[in-house]
Structure formats: C-alpha cells, structure tokens
Image (cartoon, grey):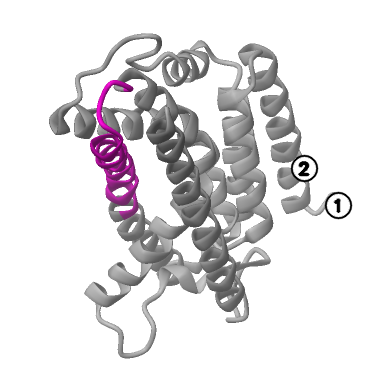
C-alpha cells in the first residue's frame, strides 16, 4: 500500500514538473519570438519568423530548433489530456512493481510524443514551403486572411460531423478501459503510439487553427489547449463539440468579414 502511494505521488510529481517546465519554456520562447518583427505582407497580415531560418542558420539547425519548440509546446498542450489515459494504463497494469510501472508509463509517454514529433517534422517543411511560395508570389498573400477565416469556419463545421464524434469516442474508449494490460515494454510502446495517432487525428482541426493563427501566439495556444482538454474530458460529447463548433463558425465568419473590410 505504501509503495503504491509513493508510486502515484512520484507520477504526479513528474507530471507537474514536466508541465510546469514545458509551460515556462513555451512562454519564454513565445515571448522572444513575438519580440521579432513579422514580415508585413499584402493583405494586412504578417509572416512569422517561425517559418524562416535565421541568418547563417542551416536547414538542419532550423529544423532542429523548430522541433525543440514544437515538442516543448506539445508537452505543455497535451499533458492535461494525456494524464487520464496514462492513469488508465497504470490501473490496467497495477499488479506490476512500482519501479517497472514507472518505466512502462514513461514508455507510453515517449511513444505518444514521438507521434507529435513526426507531425512536427511534416509541418515544418510544409510551413516553410507555403511561406516561400507566398513570398515569391505576393499577390497570393492577399487571399491569406480570407483563407484563414475559411479554414476556421471549416474546422468549426467539422465539429458537427459524425467523424469528429467518432474520433472523440475512440479517444475516450481506448484500449485497457476496465481491463488488464500486459506489463511488457512492447505493449507499452505500441499503446503510446496508438494514443498519439488517435489524439492527433482528434485534435487535427483545432491544431490547424493554431498553426494558421500563429503558432507562437500565447493566447491562441492557451485557448486551443483548453478547448482540446475540455472536449476530451467533458462527459457530454455532442453538446461540447457542438458548442466548440458554433464558436469556430462564428470566429470564421468574423475573420472573413474582417478580411473583407466590414469590421
């Protein structure tokens, strides 16, 4: 009993440390990036320096720096909704020794965040390529504010689809719910990968909003984090997704109207 209590205290201590450290580093990075002037573009928006290598920086260094920012940001954003899944896994292998359970839990977490790292590896060249096209064909940048509004509107509409509800249900009813899980490293690793894939699919729309609004936007990041966590943990799935969808549709129409000069 004492070892179980110590194990859960250690678990919560590590979670608190990781979340606090990643949140602080994210805030520092975002603050430093926001201090750098954005490149003014036709259409009244600014291109973030996130997608441009610094002077004298190789593409390898730029990618490594982006991935470091991305991974720390993902830690801060996804830990709140990952914790219940880790607790469920720990309950499923509760007969394992406390020391082994800690390593298995860490392996699940590593598998989960590896998926987000791979997504970051895909996002960075896409972002760099898109911004390079916009810089070469600046007439295209005129439609960016409209495209942003349309994307937000589309994501809001996606919240009302059966596909979204299905993804959210899959996140809530992942393996080992009320079951016993094998206590081997292979199962833990595969479970972490499965969690990451399912979570990224469920969060894809909301994360895409963050990417177009501004990845280094602290306010936007906080809003998306709260929304992702709330819809994942709140009991009434359809009501929650619908409310978030309505807010997204409203924000999308507002951005389109703003781009058209109505506001």
Task: Looking at the picture, tell me which residue is in the foreground, 107 or 247.
Answer: 107
Identity of the residue drawn at 34% across and 45% down: 116
In the image, 151: left or right of 198? right
Locate residue 37, reporting x and y percent.
60, 81
Magenta-drawn stretch, dominant element (helix, strand or loop) = helix
- Badge 1 crowding class, 10 Å Cα cut-off, few under 14, some 14 to 19, many 20 or more, is few
Name which quarter of the figure residue 156 lies in.
Answer: top right
Residue sitting at x 33%, y 18%: 92
Q: Is residue 80 magenta?
A: no
- Residue located 43% across and 13% down the image: 173
Element assignment for label 1? loop
Is residue 162 something one can see in this rendering? yes
Quadrant position of residue 252: top right
Q: Residue furthest bottom?
A: 56
Task: Provide residue 211's location: percent of width, then percent of height.
Answer: 51, 52
Residue 143 in sight here: no
Determine which of the numbered discs, if any, sits on residue 263 in the image: 1
Query: Which residue appears at 57% of the width and 35% of the height?
Result: 228
**Label 2–label 1 contact, CB within 8 A:** yes
- Looking at the rendering, the stretch of residues picked out in magenta corresponds to 94-120
Q: CA distance from mark 2 to mark 1?
A: 8 Å
Q: Secondary structure at mark 2?
A: helix
In screen coordinates, is 102 left or right of 44?
A: left
Residue 254, image quadrant: top right
Q: Is residue 99 magenta?
A: yes
Q: Nearer the viewer, residue 256 or 217?
A: 217
Residue 20 sits above or below residue 112 on the image: below
Which mark identifies residue 254?
2
């Amino acid at each position: 009993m004492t070892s179980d209590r110590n194990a859960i205290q250690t678990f919560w201590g590590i979670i608190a440390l990781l979340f606090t450290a990643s949140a602080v580093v994210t805030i520092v990075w975002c603050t430093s990036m926001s201090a750098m002037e954005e490149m003014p573009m036709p259409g009244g928006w600014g291109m973030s320096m996130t997608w441009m290598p610094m002077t004298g920086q190789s593409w390898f260094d730029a990618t490594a720096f982006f991935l470091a920012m991305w991974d720390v940001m993902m830690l801060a954003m996804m830990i709140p909704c990952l914790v219940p899944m880790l607790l469920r896994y720990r309950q499923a292998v509760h007969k394992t020794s406390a020391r082994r359970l800690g390593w298995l839990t860490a392996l699940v977490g590593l598998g989960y965040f590896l998926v987000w790292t791979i997504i970051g590896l895909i996002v960075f060249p896409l972002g760099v390529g898109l911004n390079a096209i916009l810089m070469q064909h600046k007439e295209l940048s005129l439609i960016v504010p409209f495209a942003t509004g349309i994307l937000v509107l589309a994501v809001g509409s996606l919240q009302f689809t059966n596909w979204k509800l299905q993804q959210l249900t899959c996140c809530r009813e992942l393996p080992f719910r009320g079951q016993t899980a094998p206590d081997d490293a292979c199962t833990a690793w595969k479970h972490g990968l499965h969690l990451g894939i399912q979570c990224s699919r469920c969060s894809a729309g909301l994360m895409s909003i963050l990417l177009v609004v501004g990845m280094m936007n602290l306010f936007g990041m906080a809003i998306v984090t709260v929304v992702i966590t709330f819809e994942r943990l709140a009991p009434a799935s359809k009501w929650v997704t619908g409310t978030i969808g309505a807010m997204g549709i409203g924000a999308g129409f507002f951005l389109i109207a703003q781009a058209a000069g109505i506001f």
